[in-house]
Amino acid sequence: MAEIRCPITREVIQTAQYFNNNESRFLTEFEEIKVLGEGSFGVVVSSKNRIDKKTYAVKKVKIGQFPDFDYNRVIREVEIMALLDHDNIVQYHMAWLEPDLVGISFDVSDDVSDDDDESGAPVSCADSPCLYILLEQCDGKRMDEDRIFSEKDCWSIFEDIVRGLIYIHGLQIMHGDLSPGNVFHHGGVWKIGDFGIACYLDGQDHMIHEDDKFGLYKAPDEMLAAAVDIYSAGMLLFAMLLQTRPITEMERTKEIEALKNARIKMLPDDWDDFPHRRLVLQLVTDIPDERPSLEAVLGTVQDAYILL
């Protein structure tokens, strides 16, 4: 149906939009605004719904763009997000498939956004069906911003992360990719997002996929377990606490790598006056069974507030 009209006034209230002779739900129902992020999966765009006028984040995942593309893994992300409903988790709304990737896109060969496409003019990836995931759009702040955190900020953000992890682990779900770029601010709280490599802890898989082991904030573990996220949370806390004083991105990365790779892990010398910061060492031990439970961590965080 090309047009939907009000039966009384006969006014056109929606006009179907087409691309490559296929009706596009995305182009029909949403007006694109700007790129929010991009990666090997595709692109995330800020998009305004033409009916409710709210702005959402739409994640476009290109299907089959690489020879080793795993469709079941992409669908697992959607299935997992559909289960989640918590203040400290980015809210999922719905998902759908279309024959084409339309709207704002980027050149896969260059892996960069195409500024010429930010007008929202339809652009298609040839022979590339697309999964569209509709998500809550956060207010723009992310943990990976170049900024100075107060001590109170660090513990407040960390508490939100811990509460989000307690919730998903209670559902037997492991995030697996906690990093500053996947923690967002919205409505006065911090939220965990991007469940692209999340998995079920009670599923058939027990080993971490080889491609998922590498990253500055990732645990050195081999087995799927809640302890993997606990390690990454410790690295996030360490990164935030480093930013309580002026520090360059390069200096911060070197400090994180030094802690990650050290056989005997130690904190910076000038942290001696902050005993509660020693929680970092408990979280990032290389022995998974020695990492504290998140419930115990939450108690330590609340004790840290008393010392501030």
Image: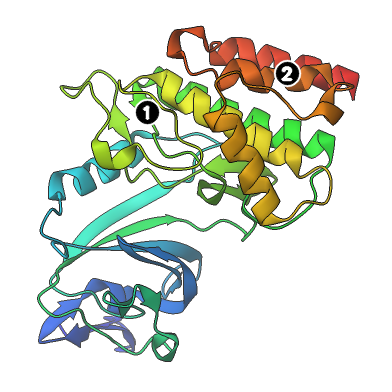
Q: Position of residue 122 (x, y in %)?
A: 29, 87
> How many residues crowd mark 1 within 10 Å: few (<14), some (14–19), many (20+)?
many
In the picture of the structure, the residue carrying the numbered disc 2 is 278
Quadrant holding the N terminus:
bottom left
Residue 229 image offset from top left, x and y in percent: 46, 27
Q: Is residue 96 left or right of residue 194?
A: left
* Residue depicted at x 76% and y 55%: 147
Whether residue 161 is visible, yes or no, is no
Residue pictured at 41% horizontal, 91% vertical: 116
Label 2 crowd (10 A; few <14 / some 14-19 / many >=20) = some
Instruction: In this rendered view, identify the residue nearer to me: 84 or 302.
Output: 302
User: Which mark identifies residue 115?
Assistant: none
From what the image shows, is residue 110 above or below residue 83? below
The amino acid type of the residue labelled 1 equals Met
Mark 1 or 2, closer to the camera = 2
Is residue 291 placed above or below 107 in the rendered structure?
above
Q: Position of residue 30 (x, y in %)?
A: 37, 75
- Specify the quadrant of the image occupied by residue 240: top right
Element at badge 1?
strand
Residue type marked 2: Arg
Q: Which residue is mark 1?
A: 174
Between 283 and 92, the one lying in front of the other is 283
In the depicted view, which residue is nearer to us: 250 or 60? 250
Residue 47 shown left or right of residue 20 in the figure: right
On the image, which quarter does residue 66 sit in?
A: bottom left
